[in-house]
Image (cartoon, helix red, strand yellow):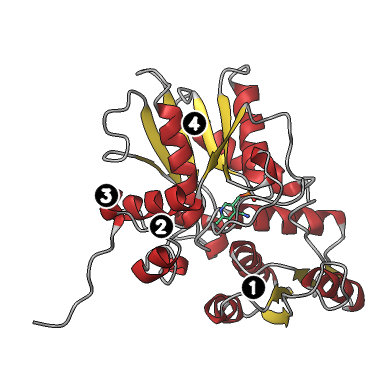
Amino acid sequence: MDYVDHVIDLVGNTPLVRLNTLAEGLRPLVLAKVEYFNPGGSVKDRIALRMVEAAEASGELRPGGTIVEPTSGNTGIGLAMVAQRKGYRCVFVCPDKVSEDKRNVLAAYGAEVVVCPTAVPPDHPESYYSVSDRLAREIEGGWKPNQYANEQNPQSHYHSTGPEIWRQTEGKVTHFVAGVGTGGTISGTGRYLKEVSGGRVRVVGADPEGSVYSGGGGRPYLVEGVGEDFWPATYDRDIADEIIAVSDGESFNTTRRLAKEEGLLVGGSCGMAVAAALRLAQRCDADDVIVVLLPDGGRGYLGKVFNDAWMSSYGFLSPDSTGATVGDVL
Ligand code: PMP
């Protein structure tokens, strides 16, 4: 019989899918590593599993312990899924700007969600950073993974994402493109690919305009999960050969094209990474192979990126990305 013991055994080994229409007229082969095939729906399943298993091994997380993390999204889903398998309690702390839908997803996995005010500075006792620190201290057996400083975040990519891409491309990958949030994906995957190829693979980061990685001062942007206003410990500055800044409008319009023209319903940071990969592809040769990582699926963004009214309220709607009309029954 062909089965796995638990859904967490399906983390990783995501497929590479060729981009066709979007890469039309470009010389290199452009392949998307589609991370929504992970059981929790995003690349973050990889780091959740490795951070938890390393904390078990080091004794930081003991049987019956509680995982406390300030997260509202993909990392929370990954941690909640792993915690369910291993019998840990999960408490997630998120700011009140996070949609009820997102909080409900975490609760559905059995996690407890604590909501904090958004409009307070990070050092305020009610900020979600302060509250998560306090809960991790006060709860008996509490452990905070801290994805922004946990070395197991880049390590998970060094040991899984990188080797998978090398194997799947039979060592032919020449460029790796990924968006940068904590920096775990690009640092771990990029380091592995550089080592295994003897420095041949070029690593390119994609970043929202305004974020620190592309030289910005932390100006706000709308694409979620990427860009920072500080330099996290999980980002290794020696890995990326180049950072390409992408505007919100281009990120979202590329995201919509991925759904409509490639059948890939993915999140806004995927469109950002693909926009950077396509810009890079214009300067590449016919024997180059570009792998671009798509972190999550698009279901969580239907009210934003895929909503014409939301897009046009920011002036992002372009004629070639207008959604299909949901009309009356004839
Ligand atoms: N896209 C999305 C949707 C994410 O949630 C994240 C993680 N913050 C990223 C991209 C960036 O990945 P990383 O943190 O590994 O840099």
User: What's the CA distance linking mark 3 and mark 4?
Assistant: 27 Å
Tell me which residue sits at (16%, 82%) in the image: 328
Identified by mark 4, the residue type is: Arg
Instruction: Looking at the image, tell me whether mark 3 or mark 4 is earlier in sequence order.
Output: 4
Q: Nearer the viewer, residue 313 or 280?
A: 313
Q: Which residue is mark 3?
A: 261
**Residue 138 placed where, x, y %?**
91, 78
Q: Secondary structure at mark 4?
A: helix
Q: Is ligand 1 within 8 Å of the beta carbon of the residue shown at mark 2?
A: no
**Residue 125 placed where, x, y %?**
88, 76
* Image side of residue 83 versus residue 325, left or right: right
Q: Are marks 4 and 2 in contact (CB under 8 Å)?
A: no
Q: Quadrant of the C terminus?
A: bottom left
The label on residue 61 is: none
Q: Quadrant of the N terminus?
A: bottom left
The label on residue 84 is: 1
Identified by mark 2, the residue type is: Phe
The label on residue 316 is: 2
- Judge depth for marks 3 and 1 and give the one in front: 3
* Image side of residue 255 versus residue 244, left or right: left
Q: Is ligand 1 within 8 Å of the beta carbon of the residue shown at mark 3?
A: no
Instruction: Looking at the image, tell me whether mark 2 or mark 3 is earlier in sequence order.
Output: 3
